[in-house]
Image (tube, rainbow, N blue to C red):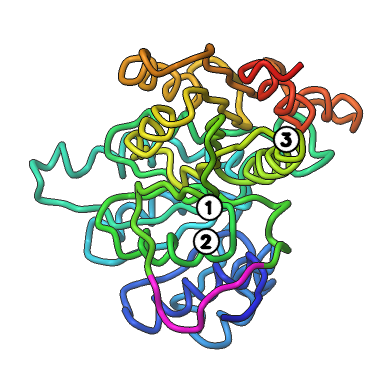
Amino acid sequence: MREIQFREALREAMSEEMRRDENIFLMGEEVAEYNGAYKVSQGMLDEFGPKRIIDTPIAELGFAGLGVGAAANGLRPIIEFMTFNFSLVAIDQIINGAAKMMSMSGGQYNVPIVFRGPTGNAGQLASQHSQNFENWFANTPGLKVVVPSTPYDAKGLLKSAIRDNDPTIFMESELMYGDKGFVPEEEYLLPLGQANVVKEGTDVTLVSFGKMMKVIIESAEIMEKEGVSCEIIDLRSVRPIDYTTVINSVKKTNRLVIVEEAWPLSSIATDISHVVQRNAFDYLDAPIHRINNRDLPLPYAPTLIEEILPSVKRTIEAIKSVTYKK
């Protein structure tokens, strides 16, 4: 085990898979000559050359479509969006192309493609560059949606996503690329759709994914000092969702708080709330509490950003409300 950055874990995953399979290539804006906008692909052009590490124009619709066509014809593209906010330009290729090819071809065509890049707030980038679309893509049959929270998860999940025969949305965070974590030197894969129980507890279940895991982990540490035992679940992927792990946890703790960096309407938190109350209603000793972004576009001012995003303060208030710790 060695400690490496989140970006390094992603780079290792892509490089190892590209050495294993010559049909894999990386394509996106600034991935080659500039070594990646966030230095995720640093050095990959030198190793794999311009035929497999491909710089594109600022034309997400075009290079996403090229990737879908390549995948349908036997290659395994990794398409990097500089931010998933830009994927909206290419969403027709993802939703009406990649996601539906298997079904519309009667099973004749797989589309083994990974669309990856950062999602969500990354500081003062204002409304058009700070959005979360995990629930948008997760709403689409035919797609898998993965949101890792640690370098260890990022590498193991990305390798699995690249090998998967279904199109996968792989969402990262600009604010996590420099995070460090322990990652094995030997090869490993993590299954898509299997949640991770980060910490076991008895009083309340806390569920999240991606960089919001930092919020619930810090909140749990504070509440532990006040005598509240928190069980922490990292979903890892939001399509498919590992409902079983969440339901079994709620049956043990009898309380649930979900934290998600996205707007509240039709969120992942909303879906989990529905499934839990349908399958574990009799076990609940308090209403399910979900914490999302405020229902507003994210502003530029840092003080307003803090008010809109999920926070440790809001999470602790929710934990106290369901455990009656006033």
| Amino acid type assigned to the residue bearing label 2 in the image | Ala
Location of residue 222 by image quarter: top right
Tell me if residue 54 can be seen. Answer: yes
Residue annotated with mark 2: 154
| Amino acid type assigned to the residue bearing label 1 in the image | Pro
Residue annotated with mark 3: 223
Q: Secondary structure at mark 2?
A: helix
Q: Secondary structure at mark 1?
A: loop
Residue at left offset 34%, top offset 82%: 20
The answer to whether 52 is drawn above or below residue 159 in the figure is below
Mark 1 and 2 residues: CB-CB less than 8 Å, in contact?
Answer: yes
Q: Earlier in the sequence, mark 1 or mark 2?
A: 1
Residue at left offset 52%, top offset 61%: 154
Give the x, y percent position of residue 301: 90, 29
Q: Predominant secondary structure in magenta? A: loop
Look at the image and give the residue range highlighted in magenta.
181-188
Q: Earlier in the sequence, mark 2 or mark 3?
A: 2
Q: Is residue 186 magenta?
A: yes
Q: Is residue 67 magenta?
A: no
Give the x, y percent position of residue 102: 18, 44
Residue 148, numbered circle: 1
Residue 246 vs residue 312: left or right? left
For the residues labelled 1 and 3, the Cα–Cα distance comes to 24 Å
